[in-house]
Image (cartoon, rainbow, N blue to C red):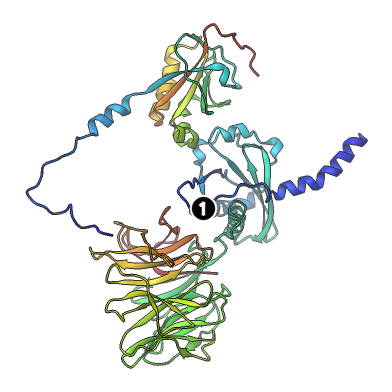
Amino acid sequence: MQPTRLARLLLFPLALLASRGYAQAPILEISGANFRPLPIAIPAPQALSDDARPAAASFDEALVLDATAAAIFQVLDRKSFLADAREGFTAASITFSRWADVGADALVKVQLAVDGTSLRGEMRLFSVASGKEELRLVHVVPLSEPRKLAHFFADALYRHYTREPGPFQTHLAFIHRVGKNREIWLSAWDGRDAVVIAKDGLNVLPAVAPDGNSVAFTSYRSGKPDLYRERPGAPPVLLVSAGQMATGIAYAPDGKHIAYSLAQGDGTNIWMANPDGTDAHAVTDTSYFINSSPSWAPDGKRLAIVSTRAGSPQLYLLSLDNPKDPRRLTFQGNYNQTPSWSPRGDLIAFTARDERNAFDLFTVNVDTGKVNRLTQDQGNNSEPSFSPNGRLIVFTSTRNGPPQLFVMTADGKNQMALPMERGEFDTADWGP
Amino acid sequence: MAMSGGRGAPGRTTMSEINVTPMVDVMLVLLIIFMVTAPLIQQGVKVNLPDARAQPVEATEKRLVLSVDREGNTYIGDTPVPSDQLEEKLRANAKAQADKEIYLHADRDVPYGAVVEVMAAAQRAGIPAVGMITDPAGAPRKKDRR
């Protein structure tokens, strides 16, 4: 017995290392022609008590949604599963050949337990080929927020396979159309767990603030468009009220500046200020044209803007060192709008009107100018916004009739509607 | 981005392509059957394989194996699956749907009808190729596998 116990003691730290597994996990290269999504089996989570069952259903829905939207996994159909429903939770008690027979490369098992007012989840990730546990995580959330637990685990899976941060614990700000009113809402990345930020009147162009808990937006509540920032349950803070109209706020990546457009006299120009609206100064100074819709480069030194200086609205790159001489980025089409600069830096997504007067989404490569079409023949598609990790894009689409929020990859694949309640939603901003 | 052309040219109605629809229909009805030699397949379900002198296909990649044992029980891999659930399980099975090919591992004493039923289930599930696992005649028979 003695040598065995000694061996166990020696092996224990090794087992811990193996369960971290970061060193051995295969890295999924997300882009490229050879990309193949990883077949992953996610059986329904096991609720350890009856009171965990309602939370388990919400958790399950959110985890499968995240894994599907991530577009790095092929989430296997549960109808094909061959494993015994009472199969265990440890590598030793799992019959991996049955998971191999349904084509799974990876297996995710989750146990959920209720502890007072909290929900405790344990997730284990197994490699089906080796039969080894690759990742083990425990996380606790309030019992009322089971989807948060799913987003946490989904981000962990994403990071495990890509070494990149996942996009699932971030936030969306969007517009809910109610009659003539335009409400601003703030939600989890998937449009769920939404709270209202601004309810009455016309509120447009939301931007998630760097703290992820408040939203800056353009509101007509004073009679003309001004910029406000608001968090749930707190009074609105006026940021900018100047000129005839101030619209379209965008936060710098470091959160230390805002950019917006301000109409004065015959022209509309891009302005910059501190996040509270102080120290405002003009960036562009064309007298007669419109310059609007700023979107920051991840380095914080450049802006993508829309300008009509050549006649039609086109995308321009503006270096803050030399803002008088922007570089034109789009030459096709006569109506290119709403740029969103990828946090990865390489692409700018935008809305364009094509020759059949349909609005569709495109990306333009910042360095090469190469344009790539992302949507086609699916109603109008507009207002793209990159996920904070730059891999996904949320956008508005009328393909099912009323405007709804959709998500897809940065190259237009895996387009799917967000699981929101019925209603009309548009102009999403995907922020921290 | 250029999407003009090809539309609205009245009067020009000549079809210049071959209509492939009937041909595709015929293709879908066909089930491709081939022979696979047994020693290459290690399977948990014990069946007594038929001998065959046909030219076998070398099994290079591991395919999903359906088994039918002497009593007529059906298996996917080594998991027992009732025959009336085979079609649904196969239709959802990512591996079989990606390979478009399965191997059938049936006991020599199973009625022909039972085997055809399994093959038909595979075909209905959208898997057009079925490899029949046989013992190559003359080869030393491997009994007591596993």
Point out residue A109 in the picture as x, y percentages from the top left corner: 63, 45
Q: Amino acid at mark 1?
A: Ile
For the point 49% across and 61% down, which residue is it? A190
Is residue B32 among the parts visible in the rendering?
A: yes
Quick check: B77 above or below A52? above
Residue highlighted by disc 1: A30
Q: In the current view of this chain or complex, which residue is farthest to the left? A: B11
Point out residue A398 in the picture as x, y percentages from the top left corner: 33, 62
For the point 47% across and 28% down, which residue is it? B86
Q: Is residue B107 left or right of residue A135?
A: left
Q: Which of the 4 quarters of the picture holds residue A218?
A: bottom left
Closer-to-camera residue (A25/A151)? A25
For the point 33% across and 76% down, which residue is it? A180
Is residue A203 among the parts visible in the rendering?
A: no
Q: Is residue B25 left or right of residue A257?
A: left
Q: Chain of mark 1?
A: A
Q: Residues within 10 Å of mark 1 (few under 14, many from 20)?
A: some
- Placement of the N terminus of chain A among the 4 image quadrants: top right
Closer-to-camera residue (A254/A329)? A329
Point out residue A73 in the picture as x, y percentages from the top left corner: 52, 48
Quick check: A49 above or below B91? below
Point out residue A64 in the picture as x, y percentages from the top left corner: 53, 50
Quick check: A46 above or below A225? above
